[in-house]
Amino acid sequence: MVVGVCELCGRDDVEITVHHLLPKEMGGTFGATANLCIPCHKQIHALYTNEEIAARLTSLSDLRKDEKLGRFIRWIRKQPSSKIMKIKKSKERRKR
């Protein structure tokens, strides 16, 4: 387990996972990555398919500018780093 700072929400002392900014299945295996906390990483994949991520969310600034993720980031910053949230797929994502 690696503990550090989430590059998306900025929370400190959280368990870190590696997020491929371009999904591996879309050619991003050896591309740029970001160290994200588990809730932020899960939220990205709960909201968007790999195709959507590859098309428009391939940088940290793109992720931060996204309206849905922006709301989540503002909320998650207020949560204690020890808390692990249950993340569900969005209603739109479940229909796909």
Image: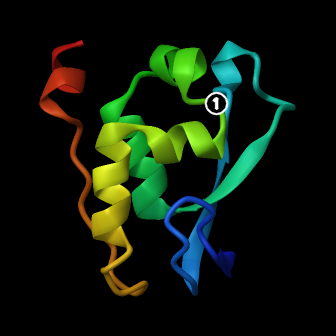
Q: Position of residue 24 (x, y in %)?
A: 69, 26
Q: Residues within 10 Å of mark 1 (few under 14, many from 20)?
A: some
Closer to the camera, 2 or 67? 67
Closer to the camera, 37 or 10? 10
Q: Residue at x 33, y 39 (%)?
A: 67
Q: Residue at x 57, y 87 (%)?
A: 13
Give the image quarter of residue 79: bottom left
Q: Give the total number of marks visible in the rendering.
A: 1
On screen, residue 41 above or below 96? below
In the picture, the quarter occupied by the C terminus is top left
Instruction: Kindly identify which residue carries mark 1.
Output: 58
On screen, residue 43 above or below 21? below
Q: How is the image coloured?
A: rainbow
Q: Residue at x 67, y 15 (%)?
A: 26
Closer to the camera, 61 or 55? 61
Q: Position of residue 44 (x, y in %)?
A: 42, 41
In the picture, the quarter occupied by the N terminus is bottom right
Residue type at the position of mark 1 = Thr
